[in-house]
Image (spheres, helix red, strand yellow):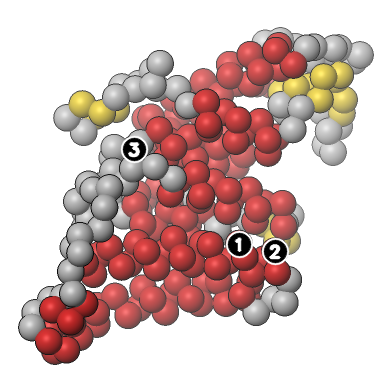
């Protein structure tokens, strides 16, 4: 059962939703016969190893798809608990699922700038922070770029919760840009000036991808940039 938000506190038995589970299954892939991964570790199902707990993986071991999913759900309990304990602000189901996926893949949520910014109420920073975790062995890995983009999309899907600068809302209020922050162009300039560094950072963070000449990379970068700019836009409109 999914946890609910009560007075800003998350219940500790929260579990990932079906959409999040399907997301992780797609990215992990499933193997129903035990095999050795690139590090030589016996693995089965959705990346399950003996180090994760029962069942112990043995040579020649076989499981069904249903068993693989049950093992995955058991393995995910650790990360669901970690996300619930580490995150101090309310999350909707898809946001929770995106962070569980990220931590399941990296094990790094606890030491990430993403967590610090999120706990400070900066929900809008999460998509960009996710995209910083795309390297393996000191090299950028396109598979990780794609997974982080998918997690960013899952994060952005559904109802916005809240942040320090943006009240919870499912719609952006209709306001004439000319009167944001005051009357006429002067008022708009006053409101926009503080977020210029954010705009520059947003574009700079994706500049290499946008100019790569690879349409897949360009599309992913444009998607992430759009999410970031929308977050900045909401701040201006608040």
- 137 w.r.t. 157: above or below: below
Q: CA distance from mark 1 to mark 2?
A: 6 Å
Residue sitting farthest toward the bottom: 186
Judged from the image, the secondary structure of the residue bearing numbered disc 2 is helix
Q: Residue at x 74, y 33 (%)?
A: 29
Residue 199 is situated, as x and y percent measured from the top left of the image, at 38, 76
| Image quarter of residue 174 | bottom left
- 77 w.r.t. 123: above or below: above
Q: Residue at x 25, y 64 (%)?
A: 235
Considering the image in quadrants, where does the C terminus appear? bottom left
Of the two numbered discs 2 and 3 in the rendering, the one whose residue sits closer to the viewer: 2
Judged from the image, the secondary structure of the residue bearing numbered disc 3 is loop
**Mark 3, residues whose alpha carbon is within 10 Å: few (<14), some, or many (≥20)?**
many
Judged from the image, the secondary structure of the residue bearing numbered disc 1 is helix
Q: Is residue 188 left or right of residue 212?
A: left
**Mark 2, residues whose alpha carbon is within 10 Å: few (<14), some, or many (≥20)?**
some
Q: Where does label 2 land, which residue?
A: 216
Residue 202 is situated, as x and y percent measured from the top left of the image, at 45, 71
Q: Earlier in the sequence, mark 3 or mark 1?
A: 3
Res 136 seen here? no
Which residue occupies the foreground of this view, 222 or 101? 222
Residue 14 is situated, as x and y percent measured from the top left of the image, at 39, 22
| Image quarter of residue 45 | top right
Q: Residue at x 34, y 37 (%)?
A: 91
Q: Where does label 3 land, which residue?
A: 91
Q: Residue at x 47, y 60 (%)?
A: 128
Q: Where does label 1 land, which residue?
A: 220
Q: CA distance from mark 2 to mark 3?
A: 30 Å
């Amino acid at each position: 059962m999914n946890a609910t938000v009560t007075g800003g506190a998350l219940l500790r038995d929260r579990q990932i939703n079906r959409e999040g589970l399907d997301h992780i299954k797609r990215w992990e892939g499933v193997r129903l016969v035990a095999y050795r991964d690139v590090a030589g570790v016996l693995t089965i199902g959705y990346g399950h190893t003996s180090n994760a707990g029962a069942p112990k993986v043995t040579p020649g071991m076989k499981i069904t798809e249903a068993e693989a999913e049950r093992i995955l759900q058991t393995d995910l309990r650790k990360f669901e608990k970690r996300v619930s304990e580490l995150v101090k602000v309310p999350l909707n189901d898809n946001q929770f699922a995106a962070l569980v996926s990220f931590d399941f893949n990296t094990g790094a949520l606890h030491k990430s700038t993403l967590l610090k910014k999120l706990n400070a109420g900066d929900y809008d920073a999460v998509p960009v922070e996710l995209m910083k975790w795309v390297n393996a062995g000191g090299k950028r890995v396109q598979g990780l770029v794609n997974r982080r983009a998918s997690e960013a999309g899952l994060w952005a899907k559904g109802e916005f919760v809240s942040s320090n600068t943006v009240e919870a809302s499912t719609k952006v209020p209709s306001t004439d840009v000319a009167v944001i922050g005051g009357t006429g162009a002067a008022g708009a300039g006053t409101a926009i000036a503080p977020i210029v560094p954010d705009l520059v950072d947003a574009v700079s963070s994706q500049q290499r991808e946008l100019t790569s000449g690879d349409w897949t990379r360009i599309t992913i970068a444009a998607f992430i940039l759009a999410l970031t700019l929308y977050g900045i836009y909401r701040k201006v409109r608040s």
